[in-house]
Image: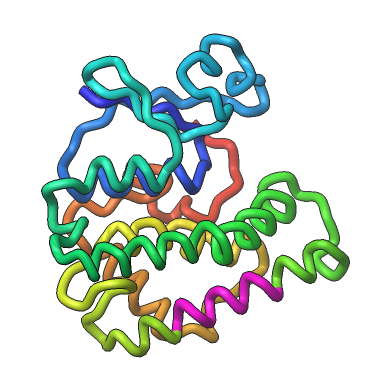
């Protein structure tokens, strides 16, 4: 069985667990703690030289790091990775956008304003993060509007791993003070993803906790 090393609220690890659930791939999950220093321990760094999650342990004992690489690995041979070369390139284009322009500001806002609970949203760098986050969400909303009511981010007929990559930090944007009301195409897209068979929330079986910071068992 595949084994996933993650942390409780990692958006990047959520991408992997979401895709695996949508594909019906079972994962053994080992949840680590940043606060305990688990990600700095020698035993973790031996399998994860980059020092962060997610890390996927393969059946042959090899380890694969970085969420986008893991999504690509899991999607091979499935409808989540298109066969057409141009469509593949379009998927990679939107995954690059997610890492470069979308995830960074949204993750920083969520981390500091919600999870750590410190920082003034009306001061820098948070004002800049908020502006960048809204700009990225507008790009995504415009793309989804172009794709039509039944389209997906990079492909029309079926969702791809670009949708999975962009989903978690978009869904959690309100945690960092970025409301989704101005983005109707995004809100409709989130509903489509959440209606897919196999959808898994950040806290499995508890979708109401997607935006929660409460420490519950």
- Image side of residue 187 versus residue 32, left or right: left
Could you tell me how many numbered marks the image carries? 0
The image's colour scheme reads rainbow
Residue at the spot x=24%, y=70% of the render?
Answer: 86
Quarter placement of the N terminus = top left
Chief secondary structure of the magenta portion: helix
- Image side of residue 132 versus residue 217, left or right: right
Seen as rendered, the residue at the extreme front is: 85
Q: Nearer the viewer, residue 101 or 28?
A: 101
217 over 126 or under it: above or below: above
Q: Nearer the viewer, residue 135 or 30?
A: 135
4 over 41 or under it: above or below: below
Q: Nearer the viewer, residue 41 or 46?
A: 46
Residue at the spot x=85%, y=70% of the render?
Answer: 122
Query: How far from the left and from the top, in percent, is residue 192?
Result: 27, 71
Query: How far from the left and from the top, in percent, is residue 91?
Result: 32, 64
Query: How far from the left and from the top, in percent, is residue 51?
Result: 58, 27
Residue at the spot x=65%, y=20% of the render?
Answer: 36
Residue at the spot x=49%, y=66% of the render?
Answer: 97
- Image side of residue 111 versus residue 205, left or right: right
Tell me, yes or no, whether the highlighted magenta stretch contains residue 84.
Answer: no
Query: How far from the left and from the top, in percent, is residue 12?
Result: 47, 46
Seen as rendered, the residue at the extreme top is: 43
Tell me, yes or no, whether the highlighted magenta stretch contains residue 138.
Answer: yes
- Image side of residue 187 versus residue 123, left or right: left
The span picked out in magenta is 131-141
């Amino acid at each position: 069985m595949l084994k996933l090393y993650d942390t409780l609220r990692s958006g990047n690890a959520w991408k992997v667990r979401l895709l695996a659930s949508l594909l019906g791939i079972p994962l053994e999950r080992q949840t680590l703690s940043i606060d305990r220093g688990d990600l700095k321990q020698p035993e973790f760094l031996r399998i994860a030289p980059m020092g962060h999650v997610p890390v996927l342990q393969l059946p042959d004992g090899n380890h694969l790091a970085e969420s986008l690489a893991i999504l690509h690995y899991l999607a091979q041979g499935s409808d989540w990775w298109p066969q057409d070369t141009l469509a593949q390139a379009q998927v990679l284009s939107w995954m690059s956008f997610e890492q470069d322009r979308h995830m960074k500001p949204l993750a920083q806002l969520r981390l500091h304003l919600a999870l750590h609970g410190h920082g003034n949203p009306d001061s820098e760098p948070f004002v800049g993060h908020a502006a960048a986050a809204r700009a990225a969400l507008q790009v995504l909303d415009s793309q989804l509007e172009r794709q039509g009511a039944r389209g997906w981010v990079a492909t029309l007929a079926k969702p791809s791993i670009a949708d999975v990559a962009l989903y978690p930090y978009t869904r959690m944007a309100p945690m960092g003070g970025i409301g989704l009301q101005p983005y109707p195409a995004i809100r409709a897209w989130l509903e489509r993803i959440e209606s897919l068979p196999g959808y898994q929330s950040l806290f499995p079986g508890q979708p109401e906790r997607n935006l929660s910071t409460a420490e519950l068992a």
